[in-house]
Image: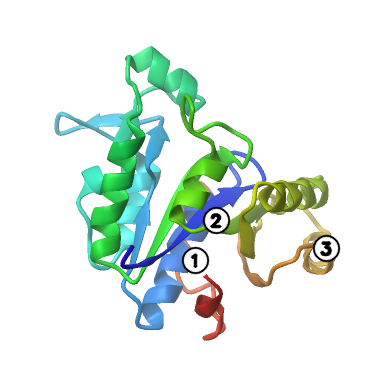
Amino acid sequence: MSARSLLVTGTDTGIGKTHASVALLHALRARGHRAIGMKPIASGCERIDGRWRNEDALALQAASDPRPAYDDVNPVALPEPTAPTLAARAAGVTVEIAALHAAHGRLAAAADIVLVEGAGGWEAPLAEGLEHRDLARYLGGAVLLVVGMRLGCLSHARLTARAIAADGCRLVGWIGNRIDPAFARADDYVGLLSDALPAPCLGVLPFVAGGVGARDALRLDPDWIATL
């Protein structure tokens, strides 16, 4: 592969993987890296100009430089907003893993770093016969964890970190995302997570109502990229 790749996973679904991925793409680009986002399998798509399009995948495409073709960012776009395995069955789609690899290869040929966003949490299947660990290993084994800052996140994050290691992959960093603006102990939990997780915190994103933002929220250590 001509680029470093990083799988972005989360402590659960709906905890801001895209929000964190977009912020990280901008931070990498600010350091002079050609950075591209990818969401290989996306459920919950809408029909735009006759093609299925996913909001998260569009956000990743817009945050990428150079700007990739949508079909490479999101090779499998599924209409139903449910688990990808169920969405694929409902749509009558068989996910061809070789096609995902080919799309990633085209992105990697134009980039220094490719951020590949998974679906749901680490143990959620991506498709029939495809787990996050399989995709992460193909990409080189580096994993970034997005932690939704809320009650229960400490256990979810620690369990996910252990599962990543047990699957033979490397947790290279984590990003906190303030998904609950009423969570008063978020700063204390960041401290606990920093002590518990075997990888550096790249930053904690502020709460953004209903979408992706905070493009300047992360300040990356220049040596961090060497860990990928």
Residue 182 vertical position relative to residue 119 in the rendered view, above or below = below
Q: Amino acid under label 3?
A: Ala
Q: Is residue 215 left or right of residue 53?
A: right
- Residue that lies at the very extreme toward the bottom in this rendered image: 222
Counting residues from the start of the chain, the first of labels 3 and 1 encountered is 3
- Return the residue nearer the eye: 96 or 68: 96
Q: Is residue 154 left or right of residue 20?
A: right
Residue 170 vertical position relative to residue 72 in the rendered view, above or below = below
Q: Circle 1 is placed at which residue position?
A: 214
- Give the quarter of the figure containing the N terminus: bottom left
| Image marks 3 and 1: residues in contact by CB distance under 8 Å | no
Q: Nearer the viewer, mark 3 or mark 1?
A: 3
Q: Circle 2 is placed at which residue position?
A: 208
- In the rendered image, residue 182, in percent from the top left (x then y), is placed at 75, 52
Q: CA distance from mark 3 to mark 1?
A: 26 Å
Mark 1 element type: loop
Counting residues from the start of the chain, the first of labels 3 and 2 encountered is 3
Q: Amino acid under label 2?
A: Val
Q: Circle 3 is placed at which residue position?
A: 196
Q: Residues within 10 Å of mark 1 (few under 14, many from 20)?
A: some
Q: Amino acid under label 1?
A: Ala
- Return the residue nearer the eye: 208 or 162: 162
